[in-house]
């Protein structure tokens, strides 16, 4: 019988992927929201659409029972460019067997995040069939169309609808299967703030001979950037670590158990070495539990072939901070400004970009989290890999802060999913195993 549900799931996935819901370009977001609404209503959900800053926010409810599960997904995707690097049409689900004999489904959004949504919906169909057409637990499903542009509507929406979203736990939008076949579950996300440092010294570029008397904006920006962290990545801004919440014993125990894939990671990307020469538990402590500052780009002056003896009038640097629980992006912004003044660079302008967000991390010992871990262990037949937090960011904090629910990430991505890149894909067998996991997880939550 499960094959019938999976066959329907593949059809739904193809139809949803075909709607090019690219939030960065405002493409087809209303159409995507309407199609998701249609899929949910066909399964008995009552769906409300709320106006977001860019795309509709959907809240769907169905089912009865003592337990309530909140699910978060998003229906928007990243732009498909560069088109020339795709081996298949980006908005057509295409089945291909790779060089290792693994059957993959390729398309934009098939992993992030339409495949995750569809496999959960398919499992709920199967669960209804097992219970005479009625879900044995309450499901509250929040789907947004702005995740790929920083979720600008979600913080305020979750704050304003916290009572409506009350649940026993929240199942987040992503998760993975590692190369050895172990499910990877994640209990949190880092916070983020994206910034530009801008420096302007003149209204026009100057002949480089004037460097004898006019300061250079790129020198000033280089001085600013080099002052922000040491050679091991420790951030040197006064007060930056003051609000950092110490990892729990459960967090440290979890990272100590993560299989060390740092060497394979290094080989896959041609990495020359790791900060602090980190490996093993220390590698994952840094990745999961510590804040980090990145330089995303350094811009200004002449960059074409040959030389041009010019003193540029201006330059800018793009930065992001990945934050951990209890660090406030607004406070980090003020600390950075104070730091630049302290080191004698008050003329460097600091500009916040896009949407910032605070970190979130759930208690791994919570019964809801342990139910997810036990389900993964039993369904996959191996001990799951549990990360207290991902190294990346997302809008999880409002769910923990305002709704008060623990949040778990468990899903169907893989280490070669090429999320956000050309040739995004999922492994077909992972999709089908993800259906089995979802069905069992829903059943256990109903009885929790």
Image (cartoon, helix red, strand yellow):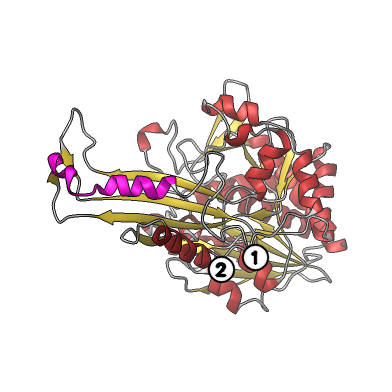
10 Å crowding of disc 2: few (<14), some (14-19), many (20+):
many
The residue under label 1 is 141
Give the extent of the magenta segment. Answer: 207-226
Q: Position of residue 382 (x, y in %)?
A: 82, 36
Q: Position of residue 211 (x, y in %)?
A: 18, 43
Viewer-side residue, 362 vs 233: 233
> Mark 1 or mark 2, which is nearer the start of the sequence?
2
Local SS, label 1: strand
Residue occupying the point 33% across, 58% down: 348
Q: How many marks?
A: 2
Residue occupying the point 47% across, 66% down: 334
Viewer-side residue, 140 vs 262: 262
Q: Position of residue 21 (x, y in %)?
A: 44, 55
Residue 109 visible to the viewer = yes
Residue 57 is one of the magenta-drawn residues: no
Q: Quadrant of the C terminus?
A: bottom right
The Cα atoms of the two marked residues, 2 and 1, are separated by 8 Å
Local SS, label 2: strand
The residue under label 2 is 58
Residue occupying the point 68% across, 66% down: 400
Q: Position of residue 91 (x, y in %)?
A: 45, 44
Residue 220 is one of the magenta-drawn residues: yes
10 Å crowding of disc 1: few (<14), some (14-19), many (20+):
many
Q: Quadrant of residue 432?
A: top right
Cβ atoms under marks 2 and 1 closer than 8 Å: yes
Q: Is residue 4 above or below residue 158?
A: above
Q: Main secondary structure of the magenta part?
A: helix
Is 363 left, or right, of 81 in this rendering?
A: right
């Amino acid at each position: 019988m499960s094959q019938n549900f999976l066959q329907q799931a593949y059809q739904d996935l193809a139809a949803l992927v075909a709607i090019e819901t690219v939030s960065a370009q405002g493409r087809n977001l209303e159409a995507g929201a309407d199609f998701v609404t249609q899929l949910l209503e066909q399964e008995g959900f009552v769906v409300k659409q709320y106006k977001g800053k860019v795309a509709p926010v959907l809240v769907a409810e169905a089912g009865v029972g003592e337990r309530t599960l909140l699910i978060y997904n998003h229906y928007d995707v990243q732009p498909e460019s560069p088109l020339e690097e795709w081996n298949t049409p980006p908005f057509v689900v295409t089945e291909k067997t790779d060089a290792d004999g693994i059957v993959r489904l390729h398309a934009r959004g098939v992993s992030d995040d339409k495949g995750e949504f569809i496999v959960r919906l398919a499992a709920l169909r199967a669960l209804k069939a097992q219970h005479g057409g009625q879900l044995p637990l309450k499901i509250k499903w929040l789907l947004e169309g702005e995740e790929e542009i920083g979720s600008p509507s979600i913080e305020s929406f979750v704050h304003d609808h916290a009572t409506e979203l009350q649940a026993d736990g929240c199942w987040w939008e992503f998760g993975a299967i590692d190369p050895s076949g172990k499910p990877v579950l994640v209990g949190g996300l880092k916070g983020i703030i994206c910034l530009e440092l801008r420096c302007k010294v003149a209204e026009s570029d100057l002949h480089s001979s004037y460097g004898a008397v006019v300061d250079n904006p790129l020198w000033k920006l280089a001085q600013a950037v080099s002052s922000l962290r040491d050679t091991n990545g420790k951030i040197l801004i006064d007060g930056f670590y003051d609000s950092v919440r110490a990892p729990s014993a459960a967090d440290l125990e979890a990272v100590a158990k993560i299989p060390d894939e740092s060497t394979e990671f290094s080989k896959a990307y041609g990495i020359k070495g790791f900060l602090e020469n980190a490996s093993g538990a220390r590698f994952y402590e840094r990745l999961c539990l510590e804040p980090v500052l990145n330089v995303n780009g350094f811009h200004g002056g002449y960059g074409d072939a040959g030389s041009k003896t010019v003193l540029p009038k201006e330059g800018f640097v793009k930065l992001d901070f990945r934050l951990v629980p209890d660090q406030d992006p607004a406070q980090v912004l003020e600390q950075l400004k104070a730091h630049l003044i302290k080191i004698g660079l008050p003329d460097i302008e600091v500009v916040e970009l896009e949407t910032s967000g605070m970190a979130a991390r759930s208690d791994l010992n919570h019964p809801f989290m342990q139910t997810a871990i036990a389900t993964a262990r039993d369904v996959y037949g191996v001990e799951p890999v549990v990360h207290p937090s991902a190294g990346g960011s997302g809008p999880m904090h409002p769910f923990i802060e305002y709704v008060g629910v623990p949040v778990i990430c468990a899903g169907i991505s893989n280490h070669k999913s090429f999320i956000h890149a050309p040739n995004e894909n999922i492994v077909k067998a992972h999709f089908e195993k993800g259906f089995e996991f979802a069905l069992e997880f829903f059943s256990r939550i109903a009885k929790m």
